[in-house]
C-alpha cells in the first residue's frame, strides 16, 4: 500500500495515525516513519484496514437493521 493511499484511507474512515496505531497495536513511532525516506507501509496494513472498514460497515448496517426492526 502506498503511503498516500494509506493516509487517504485513514482520513476517509475518520482514523488518526495515533488511533490506527493504538487499534492495530503498533508503536506510533513506527507508523509515523512510514512514507519518510522511502520507508514503505508494512505489507499487512492494507488487509488490516480492509477488514477494519468491512467490520465497521457491518456494525453500522447491523445497527440500522436493529433500529428499523425494533421500531414501535
Image (tube, rainbow, N blue to C red):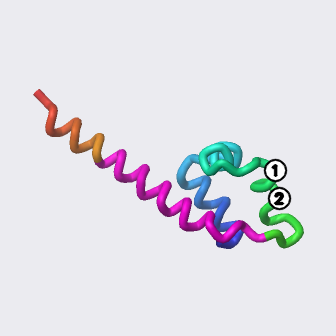
**Residue 22: x and y, percent?**
65, 43
Q: Let me know if residue 46 is in the magenta part.
A: yes
For this view, does 59 lie left or right of residue 46?
A: left
Q: Residue at x 53, y 52 (%)?
A: 13
For this view, does 56 lie left or right of residue 37?
A: left
As drawn, the residue found furthest toward the top would be: 72
Say which residue label 1 marks. Answer: 29
Q: Secondary structure at mark 1?
A: helix
Q: How many marks?
A: 2
Crowding at label 1, few (<14), some or many (≥20) Cα neighbours within 10 Å? Answer: few
**Residue 39: x and y, percent?**
82, 69
> Which residue range is magenta in the image?
40-61
Quadrant where the N terminus lies? Answer: bottom right
Please identify the dominant SS of the magenta region. Answer: helix
Q: Nearer the viewer, residue 11 or 50?
A: 50
- Residue 12 is marked as none
Crowding at label 2, few (<14), some or many (≥20) Cα neighbours within 10 Å? Answer: few
Give the CA distance from mark 2 to mark 1: 6 Å
- Rendered image quadrant of residue 37: bottom right
For this view, does 10 lie left or right of residue 65?
A: right
**Residue 12: x and y, percent?**
55, 55
**Residue 28: x and y, percent?**
76, 48
Say which residue label 2 marks. Answer: 33
For this view, does 25 lie left or right of residue 38?
A: left
Q: Residue at x 70, y 51 (%)?
A: 26
As drawn, the residue found furthest toward the right would be: 37
- Rendered image quadrant of residue 62: top left
Quadrant where the C terminus lies? Answer: top left
Q: Residue at x 62, y 67 (%)?
A: 44
Q: Are marks 2 and 1 in contact (CB under 8 Å)?
A: yes
Q: Let me know if residue 42 is in the magenta part.
A: yes
Q: Residue at x 64, y 67 (%)?
A: 5
Amino acid at each position: 500500500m502506498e503511503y498516500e493511499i494509506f493516509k487517504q484511507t485513514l482520513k476517509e474512515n475518520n482514523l488518526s495515525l495515533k488511533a490506527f496505531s493504538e487499534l492495530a497495536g503498533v508503536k506510533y513511532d513506527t507508523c509515523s516513519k512510514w512514507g519518510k525516506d522511502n520507508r514503505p507501509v508494512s505489507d499487512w496494513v492494507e488487509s488490516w484496514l480492509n477488514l477494519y472498514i468491512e467490520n465497521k460497515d457491518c456494525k453500522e448496517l447491523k445497527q440500522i437493521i436493529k433500529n428499523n426492526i425494533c421500531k414501535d
